[in-house]
Amino acid sequence: MAKVEQWGNICNCVNTCALTGAAAFFAGIPGAEIINNGPLWCYFYALRYLEHAKPDIGKFYHGTQPDNNAVIYGTEKFLLEELELRKKAATSSIMLIENSCSVSLIGDDIAGIARKANMPWPVVCFDSGGLLGNFCQGYSLVGVKCLQELKPTKKIPKKNKRINILGMSLGYFNDDNDLAEIKRLLTLAGYEIGACIGDGASVEEIMNLSSAEFNLVMHEELGLEIAKFLEVEYGMPYVSSGIPYGLEGTVNWLKSLPGYIPQNEIAIEVEKYRDKLFAATNEMRLVWGELWYDSIVVSGPSTMAVSLAEALRREWVDTGKLTVILQDIPINKHTSTEIDALLLTAENMEEVEKVLSSFASGLLMGSSSETVVLQRNKHAENTQICNISYPIADELLITDEPFMGLRGAAHMLQRLWNGKITMKVCR
């Protein structure tokens, strides 16, 4: 049976729609304005999701709010009114106009409407919504469309060991801390950070992205198609080696980078963390026993879920069975000897629901969507829960600690141990 992502699988269970993903990409460009051409429901749906990571997004994310007559007469009137307001009220670097599902069906020429408005900055027009796909598809497609519109400069001298970072997004849980750790590690390893496309890079930086030696893809479901586009159009090679979780996982990830030369600073830091983690966890083992779970379920975006699951089994915990649930259809097939069962919500939804509804005890790493299923079946009190992806309704995380990299290895192990200790004490 073909893999099909249904609306219910995307928006009701584990993911959000392409409209949200497209908005997230542009929310990562300083000075960008976003116009949601659609009903208020779609506007607030995306706004609520993105404001967790960017509380001020309402200042530059706007809605046209067309009335019911727009189904017959189109949305040009409402869109032009909003564009005139933006022209008077803001100085933007770039603008995204995204149609929601219902407006996309009307068939308005939003690119033509934008030209009619004669906006003073580049405008990218995009039909999105759940009918197009999920968050990562919206992010990826609009990322390519943005590059096609901007047409970055091609004839720029390459800078040795300069890297563009692709496939990071504020729409992912703890993204800002993870990105800071990735940049820190790359700088320690002797690389220069170029454009972080879709997560901090300005329009000017995007225009000069071809000066990088290669592109580094983090989350494949977000950045791989963008990397392929840049390889074809700009002759830029890319590397994609998963996500660096754990101490050894981070070291191996660094070794996979082109031109990587081992650095004393990194070796010293790895040994420091290795000694520190061994001493701390050894004491915990003597008091509380091994970090063992009969069963573990990891649910999240595909690159994150697979990479995190591998770090769990190789470095952090012991388990009888490790099940991974992917929230999207991965571009490349994931194979791992560490994972016992790999499920896709797009094609295995019944099996996913069965796994979660029968999960009586162990470790769940996912979002509040999975936690709700356990609570409904009265299994949450016997399960250790560690949030790794949105939506999150049962945890506040406001520190600067990452999940990725060397600092993230300590932070994640700390979360796992503290969760285990809390479970034992509460019992």
Image (cartoon, grey):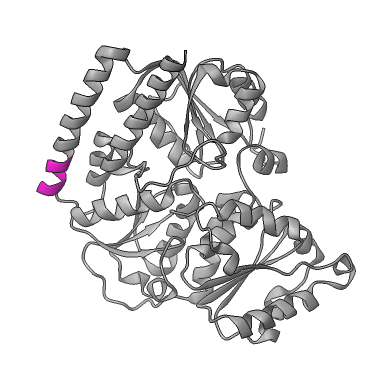
Viewer-side residue, 321 vs 367: 367
Which quarter of the figure has residue 5? top right
**Residue lying at 45% horizontally and 48% vertically, measured from the top left:** 220
Which quarter of the figure has residue 392? top right
Q: Within the magenta stretch, is there residue 357?
A: no
Q: Where is residue 169 drawn, in percent x and y?
A: 47, 54
> For the magenta stretch, what is the residue range?
264-269
Q: Is residue 360 left or right of residue 285?
A: right
Q: Is residue 385 visible?
A: yes
**Residue lying at 50% horizontally and 53% vertically, measured from the top left:** 53
Q: Where is residue 269 drawn, in percent x and y?
A: 16, 42
Q: Where is residue 6 drawn, in percent x and y?
A: 70, 41
**Residue lying at 30% horizontally and 71% vertically, measured from the top left:** 211
Secondary structure mostly seen in magenta is: helix
Rendered position, 151 above or below 145: below
Rendered position, 25 above or below 151: above
Viewer-side residue, 362 vs 289: 289
Q: How many marks?
A: 0
Q: Within the magenta stretch, is there residue 265?
A: yes
